[in-house]
Image (cartoon, rainbow, N blue to C red):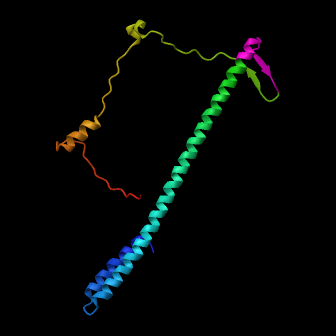
């Protein structure tokens, strides 16, 4: 049975037992405690499974971080080798090397804009950008101080903690 079914069974039993006049109080107590015990056992098992999933999540995150670090190292190594090869080819005066599987060529990149002194750039090449943003911290502080802020509200959510 799942937790919902156990909960429903508990309240059904509670309702049925409250309608019985001749049922000994000890029997009612034992019946309800048995259902509560079953619920607690199930809840403990579900919580243990949650903790296991959270441990899996942490292990996966660590593996992702390790793979990202490795990917970055491999990319940096490839870039260093690319620069090494380019420098060696330029030193030898070679612009291209042909091979059966691939060709190696030193080519010009597209032109790139470099602003080396912004103050010297004429006004015709400038514009002003103004951006309006909502100040979340100020709104939260106002709402906590019982100030009404149209379009905003504070919400209190619940979470389950398993330690």
Relative to 84, does residue 8 appear above or below in the rendering?
below
Q: Position of residue 27 (x, y in %)?
A: 32, 88
Decide whether residue 27 is among the magenta residues.
no
Name the residue rendered at 38%, 80% in the picture. 34
Quadrant that contains the C terminus: bottom left
Callout count: 0
Q: Position of residue 12 (x, y in %)?
A: 33, 80
Name the residue rendered at 69%, 23% in the picture. 82
Would you identify the image quadrant in which residue 146 lies?
top left
Q: Which residues are magenta?
A: 87-99
Would you identify the image quadrant in which residue 75 lies?
top right
State the residue lying farthest toward the bottom. Answer: 22
Q: Position of residue 147 (x, y in %)?
A: 17, 42
**Who is closer to the viewer here, 44 or 129?**
44
State the residue lying farthest toward the front. Answer: 163
- Left or right: residue 56 versus residue 28 is right
State the residue lying farthest toward the right. Answer: 100
Decide whether residue 97 is among the magenta residues.
yes
Relative to 95, does residue 13 appear above or below in the rendering?
below
Name the residue rendered at 58%, 46% in the picture. 63
Q: Position of residue 118 (x, y in %)?
A: 42, 11
**Who is closer to the viewer here, 94 or 14?**
14
Relative to 115, does residue 100 appear above or below in the rendering?
below
Quadrant that contains the N terminus: bottom left
């Amino acid at each position: 049975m799942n937790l919902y079914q156990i909960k429903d069974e508990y309240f059904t039993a509670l309702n049925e037992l409250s309608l019985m006049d001749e049922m000994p109080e000890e029997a009612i107590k034992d019946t309800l405690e048995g259902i509560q015990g079953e619920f607690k056992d199930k809840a403990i098992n579900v919580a243990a499974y949650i903790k296991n999933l959270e441990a899996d999540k942490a292990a996966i995150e660590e593996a992702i971080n390790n793979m990202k670090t490795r990917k970055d190292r491999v990319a940096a190594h490839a870039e260093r080798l690319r620069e090494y090869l380019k420098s060696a080819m330029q030193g030898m005066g070679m612009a291209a090397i042909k091979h059966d599987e691939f060709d190696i060529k030193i080519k010009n990149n597209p032109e790139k804009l470099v602003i080396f002194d912004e103050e010297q750039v004429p006004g015709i090449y400038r514009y002003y950008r103004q951006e309006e943003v909502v100040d979340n911290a100020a709104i939260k502080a106002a709402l906590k101080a019982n100030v009404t802020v149209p379009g905003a509200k504070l919400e209190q959510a619940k979470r389950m903690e398993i330690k």
